[in-house]
Structure formats: C-alpha cells, structure tokens
Image: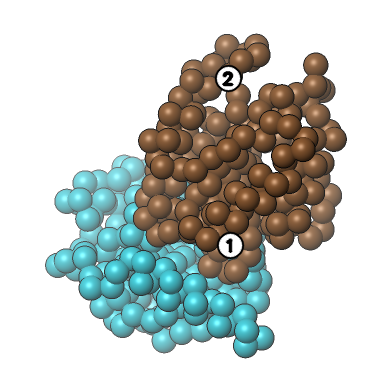
Chain colours: A cyan, B brown
Amino acid sequence: MLRLDCLRSVYSQLEGCLVVTIMGAVAAELQSLGHRPNFFYLQHAMGLASSTGLGLALCLPEQTVVVFDGDGSLLMNLGTLSTMARYRPKNLVHVVFDNESLLSVGGFPTATSTGTDLEGIARASGIPRMLTVRNVGSFQTAMTDAMQGNELTTIIAKVEAKGPAAFVTDLSLLENRFEFRRHVQSLKKRQ
Amino acid sequence: MPVSISNSKLIYEALKECDIRLLSALPETWLVHLIRQAEDDPEMILVRLAKEEEAVGISAGAHFAGVKSAMLMQNHGFLASINGIVSFAHLYKIPLLMLISYRGTHGERDPWQTQGGNVTEPLLRALGIPYSFLDALDNVKKRIRQAQTLAESSLQPVALLLTRDLMWEE
C-alpha cells in the first residue's frame, strides 16, 4: 500500500476537515494532490502534529480534525497518545502512516520494523478506538468510519517506504501557517 | 504546603483577565494551586501533559482556533520543550505565553533542581525569548498582561519566571 494512494482515496473527504500533517513525504504528497487552505503542514517539530491536532480539536469541538502522523514522528512523542486518550476528543482522527522507516533521511528502519506495535501502544494508552489497515480499501473505510464516528480513533496504515522525489515544495511555511489560521477563523465567523 | 495559595489565585485571576481559555500543564510543587483552580473552572480547558513539549503543539492548535492559551511548566519542562519552541513556535511565528516556575535559584533546598536554575536565563537569552519575573504582588497582573500582549503582537514565545519570592511562603 502506498501512502499517496491512501491520501488520494480520502482527498475529497478532507475538504470539510482541518488537516495537520507531519513533515517530509506526507506533506509533499498531500500537496501534490492539491493544496487547500484547510491543510497545515508541520514541517519540523517532529512529534507535535498530533498535539496540534489535539489543541485544535479541543478548542473547536464542532470541526473534524484529521492528523496525518508517521511512525518516526509518533515514536518521538509517544506520550501524546496518553494525552489524547485522556481527553479523547470525538472530533479527532489520528492517522499514523507506518512505513517502518525514517524515509526522508534515507530510509533508516524505525522500531516498528523490529516489533514495536503502535496499535498496541495506542490501545494500552487508552485510545478508545484503533485499528491497523493494510490496503487502500480498508484505509478508506476506516477513515470514513472515523470521520463520521463519534470517537477518537487512531488508524495505523502500514505503507511502503516509498515517497516523492522531492520534499521541498513551493509553499512557504509562514504562508501556509497564516492561510491556515485565516481559514479556521473564517469557519468560526460562518457559524 | 507552603506554596502561596493567595498568590497562585492572583496569577490565575490575571490569566483569566487576559482571556486565557486553555491552560496546558505538567504539575510541579509550585504550580499545584494554579492547576487546581483550572480544574475547578468550567470555562478553562485544562490539558494535563505527559511532557511539556506537547504544550507547544497544543498552544499552536489553540492559536489557529483563535483561543488564547498559556503553558504552566517548571524550568526543567522549558528545557524539555526547546526543540518544539525553536522548530514550531519560532519557525512558524506562534505566540506562546509560558509561565515557568524558576526552581534551582537562591533559596533552593532540592539539590536536583539546582543545575536547571543555573541555565534557565542563559537559555532564554540564547533563544531570544523575551522574559520577565513574577516576583511581587503588585506587579503580577501587569506583567502577565504585558507578556500576553507581547506574545500576541510579536507572534513569538514570551516567558514569565515565577519566583520563589512570589510562590513560596516560609
């Protein structure tokens, strides 16, 4: 399963959500499908995309927040699972693309390649709903269920360690940040 | 416990007057009364953390949502947050109001706090984080308001060091 195919399968559903991604391949691939003002790419600070999603979800309970995390990033901040589980916002969908690799620095294997089980850690952290998917159809179904469901969900998507040719895009970090906030504020005004 | 309840209340009132609606915290002795007030306040979103760096992401999310937030941490928690401060808050111009208990300075009895006390201000200066002290009753409200105003106008982290003189009664 390719991450890009997963992203493509849910791209249209992301339109009404607030989306936070980690750096590297995830950010570049989502942008390659077409940037939108409701997408924020955290191009560093590994581990904090899920914390950002948690802050958004707690402050905006009426919005659906989707975080595209990765195994390398999540392993840097496993405590985030216990914090998310503690507050378990119903409007937060936490996706972890697990390619068992730190792909953007040359594909060094992470601990998920040697047996660390992120679904198990999510469960033991108290995340109310979690599942592992291995094909695009299952991913799409899991995403639809999580986005329409009423429960914090962590989806572990096992993907191949393949990414885009380049990670730097022409969207500047600050342009993305200010556009994203303006978009979120416009949603609040509409309510 | 000789942590000042009345001064903790004053700090909490000042945060409320700044319209702080989300408080992230990792408990330490000097912060217990502040955290308890947040627990009892239905208007406050209190996020208890596993590690302080999470608070940088949570406050960024709150900022995107248009919600004013503050972070409560010990100076060792500030040390644990530095990558998040640099590679998120500074990189993306995110306002952070950091209330940091300034352990390990004059009067400290716990040996394990002392090294962190030595490096807190040099690190704040190295990171270019504007900071001031909460050290007396008559300046608490003004300094919290000023720090929050600067964080919002400059879109950067701003720190307030909670001192022994204010937090501890002995």
Quadrant of res A6: bottom left
Mark number, residue A166: none
Residue located at (82% from left, 41% from top): B9
Side of A4 where A53 appears, left or right:
right
The residue tagged with tag 1: helix, strand or loop?
helix
Side of A49 where B63 appears, left or right:
right
Above or below A176: residue B59: above
Amino acid type indicated by mark 2: Gly
Mark number, residue B62: 1
Total numbered circles: 2
For marks 1 and 2, the one nearer the N-term is 1
The quarter of the rendered structure image containing the C terminus of chain B is: top right
Write down the residue under mark 2.
Answer: B104
Q: Chain of mark 1?
A: B
**Callouts 1 and 2 in the same chain:** yes
Q: Residues within 10 Å of mark 2 (few under 14, many from 20)?
A: many
Residue located at (26% from left, 51% from top): A102
> As rendered, which of B137 and A184 lies closer to the eye?
B137
Above or below B132: residue B120: above
Amino acid type indicated by mark 1: Ala
Residue farthest to the left? A165
In the image, residue A186 lies at what x, y percent?
Answer: 55, 83
> As rendered, which of A98 and A184 lies closer to the eye?
A184
The quarter of the rendered structure image containing the N terminus of chain B is: top right
The residue tagged with tag 2: helix, strand or loop?
loop
Residue located at (63% from left, 65% from top): B67
Side of A108 where B89 appears, left or right:
right
